[in-house]
Image: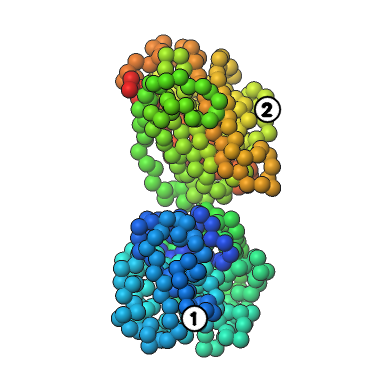
Amino acid sequence: MNLALLLLAAQPVSSPASGALVVIGGGAIGPEIASKLVALAGGPSAPWVVIPTAGDRETYDAKSVEGGFLSKAGVADITVLHTRDRKIADTEEFVAPLKRARGVFFPGGRQWRLVDSYLGTRTQREIEAVLARGGVVGGTSAGATILGSYLVRGAREGNTIMMAPGYEQGFGWLSPVAIDQHLLARKRENDLVPVLAKHPELLGIGIDESTAIVVAKGQFEVIGPGKVAVYEAGKSYYFLSSGDKFDLARRAPISAQAQAAARTVPPIPKYEVKRAKSKIAVDGKLDDAAWQGAAAVEFLFPWEFQKGSKQKTTARVLWDDDFLYVGYDCEDADIVAHFDKRDDPTYRDDAVEIFINPNPANPYYYGLEMNAKAILYDYLAGPSLHLNHTDFAGVQLATHLRGTLNQTGDKDSGWSLELAIPWSNFWDMQKKIPPPPGAVWTVNLNRWDGVEPNRRLSMWSDSGTPNPTPHNNARFGQLVFVKD
């Protein structure tokens, strides 16, 4: 490749200055992608416009064009906008719904139909105004490809033709970019290579089914279970996975270290631990009335470069004269736990943890790590993370599984865990037990989820470390004990 072409291939990729694009590779649109679209539009009450013109029907209604994913995500304000006539697409009356929209979505079909109806019309300009107002524009399959500047598979004759004169221009909200879809599901991973050879200025992006890139602020992030391939002229293509980020200006992935360094660490949280108003039976179900009086905290996902799914975890804490109680509820599509003996390394399974320091002036803290089989690994952690063997006495521990254990062929919904720790276990570090009202202990609540390499750590208080670890007692949250 000569110097001029090298310079072309190195030019930064432009993306919307405000708002966001959600570019989906076709297939089923899962809850992670749907919820991201809805959130970027401003929530379920935001108005949406769906443009199904890539399809082959003459008329559409809301239920038939968006696969129900917006409705299932709670969106009620959906307007269908469709015409085959460019003159109509250029009228003020036709574009009126776009003037109030916060989200626009293009379902799949054939790209050329979108070109014929909307390219260069008032409709396109009003969609760009949605982005300028901070809204979101999404598309799947053909509706994804049209969002780039170079249109692949635009031929009227069929979607196997990658470059079709007369149908090579997309809306250009990512430029210079060619977007392909159904990447691995339809064995298309090599189809963009000749396109880039002929048009070396392009960045090629191939997206697999049920997977998306979320474009905002000059970068994109991959979400969903599949892969995204990145293509540049004269280079081998490579794949990105969920959580990976890409700098469009630099045309380069953002390293895990850079992502960690750039993230903002939130303030250390506080939690008021109330006295249980009724008896708690430790059976793992969290259905005792006492738990209704305890606020639930939702865990954070501090490290975006981790590959595992972001499955929600909440925790609650209570106390009475005999015990400190902790309850966890974990969404989990595949519950995995193999260790079954006390002090086995349960953190390698699907597991939750509490790190607790009853005397914040002391550099030591207790660690209790419990897997989905209700097996406990406990220790005393010291400076430099030296772990000292300890055995908490009288601990009550139980789990309740909403699914099956270690059966990857089915789909689970989650599991919960209940823990009761007798106060006497803290005597060596804190003599005032139970803690008097106003006493402050420091803790962190964590969860290890999934199987390597798709494993993720979430926690109540962000540990503030560049790489995933829960062991930073300087960033533990505060438990403030109260009577009521």
Q: Residue at x 42, y 20 (%)?
A: 278
Graded by Cα atoms within 10 Å as few (under 14), some (14 to 19) or many (20 or more), the crowding at tag 1 reads few
Q: Residue at x 38, y 28 (%)?
A: 293
Residue 353: image x %, image y %?
52, 30
In the picture, the quarter occupied by the N terminus is bottom right
Rendered view: 52 above or below 277: below
85 left or right of 243 in image:
left
Graded by Cα atoms within 10 Å as few (under 14), some (14 to 19) or many (20 or more), the crowding at tag 2 reads some
Residue 246 seen in this snapshot: no
Q: Residue at x 41, y 72 (%)?
A: 80
- Residue pointed to by mark 2: 340
For the rendered model, the colour scheme is: rainbow
Pointer 2 with pointer 1, Cβ within 8 A: no
Amino acid on which disc 2 is placed: Asp
Residue 77 seen in this snapshot: yes
* Distance from Cα at disc 2 to Cα at disc 1: 61 Å
User: Is 35 in front, or is 247?
Assistant: 35
Tell which circle, 2 or 1, labels the residue nearer the N-terminal end.
Answer: 1
User: Is 385 in front, or is 431?
Assistant: 431
- The numbered disc on residue 58 is 1
Residue 138: image x %, image y %?
45, 67
In the picture, the quarter occupied by the C terminus is top left
Total number of numbered discs in the rendering: 2
Rendered view: 232 above or below 444: below
Q: Residue at x 68, y 39 (%)?
A: 406
User: Is 267 in front, or is 425?
Assistant: 425
Amino acid on which disc 1 is placed: Glu
